[in-house]
Image: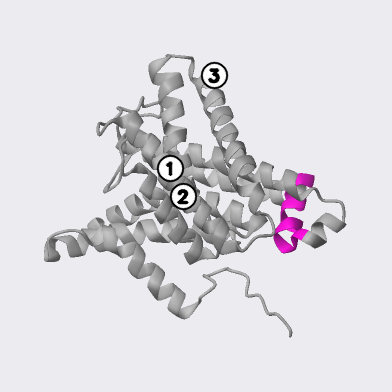
Amino acid sequence: MSEFIQLFVLGLMEGALYAMCGACIVLVYKATEVASLAHGQLLAFGAIFFYVFYGFMELPLVVALLLTFLASGLLGMIIERVAMRRLIGQPLFAAFLVTFSLFMVMDGVLNIILQGDMLAFPHFLPTGHMEWGPLNMPIGQVVSFFISLALFGLLALLFKFTKIGLGMLATAENHQLAQSTGVRVEKIFSVIWILSAVVAAVAGMATANIMDIYHPLPMLGIKGLIVALFGGLDSLPGALLAGLFLGIFESVAAGYLDPLVGGGVKEVAPYVMLLLILLVKPYGLFGLVRIERI
């Protein structure tokens, strides 16, 4: 029983990172109805920005964090202005393919930066382990878990109580209708890409703090897409719950099945989970089912 609890808690900690990755995709989809693949790379570049400002330039932590968020937000704004804004009113599948193209282009840039090597991420979160009864938990992952919960709380407040958040909700419902009521749709698109890029940077730093910066890091964005699909592409609470569930499912499945099959269960588990939920609920757990009258 203690082994199960240990796997459960470790999965919960890792699931918080998946939830943040899923939140980036949900944010963009809520305003633009585009499921973005580019955020896996935004996650990796956020970690690289922090590496440059804090590890290479050795700036104070607060300054390095602010510059990282600024650089990540600027990158998100450039992507929206150069690539995504031109696709307003175009088929959504075309926009989805553009995000895939952005992923591949940025993947090439990442390869040039890394040169097949690994960057040792400057650890800024507490290190070591904490013991609580039979549990042994990395302190860095515990801190990341609470950062994730706080981030989701702030996003919920943003959507509920701010003018820009209400504008995002209106834009997500209908672009033309929102524009007719005075909402500046193009401004909303810029804000949402900036905000989602900053959230991706937070997720990237928290992940790199555990696994350093190397080429597979952007693939965490694929798990973010799985989380978003599982919870519902337009549901932030769904992304949080789906991310936590995915982390637990991976951890428990790998812990019990890897010794039997020789490993690899953790890589397969997310896709099995996604297949099962989409067969039962195609819109995800909390996705909005849209009914159109003809």
Could you tell me the amino acid type at mark 3?
Val
Figure colour scheme: one colour
Identify the amino acid type marked 2: Ser
* CA distance separating discs 2 and 1: 6 Å
User: Can the viewer see residue 271?
Assistant: yes
Say if residue 195 shows up in the picture: no
Mark linked to residue 105:
1
Q: Is residue 23 magenta?
A: no
Relative to 59, is 10 on the left or the right?
left
Q: Residue 173 colored magenta?
A: yes
Residue 206 relative to residue 89: left or right: left
Choose top left, top right, bottom left or bottom right for residue 88: bottom right
Task: Specify start and end residues of the magenta stretch as a single range.
Answer: 163-175
Residue drawn at x 70%, y 51% is: 159
Q: Residues within 10 Å of mark 1 (few under 14, many from 20)?
A: few
The furthest residue to the bottom:
294
State if disc 1 and disc 2 touch (CB < 8 Å).
yes
Q: Amino acid at mark 1?
A: Val
- The Cα atoms of the two marked residues, 1 and 3, are separated by 29 Å
Depth check: give the residue in front, 181 or 15. 181
Q: Residue furthest right?
A: 181
* Disc 1 to disc 3: CB gap under 8 Å: no
What residue is disc 2 on? 101
Q: Earlier in the sequence, mark 1 or mark 3?
A: 3
Name the secondary structure under disc 2. helix
Residue 63: mark:
3
Quadrant of the image for the N terminus? bottom left
Element carrying mark 1: helix
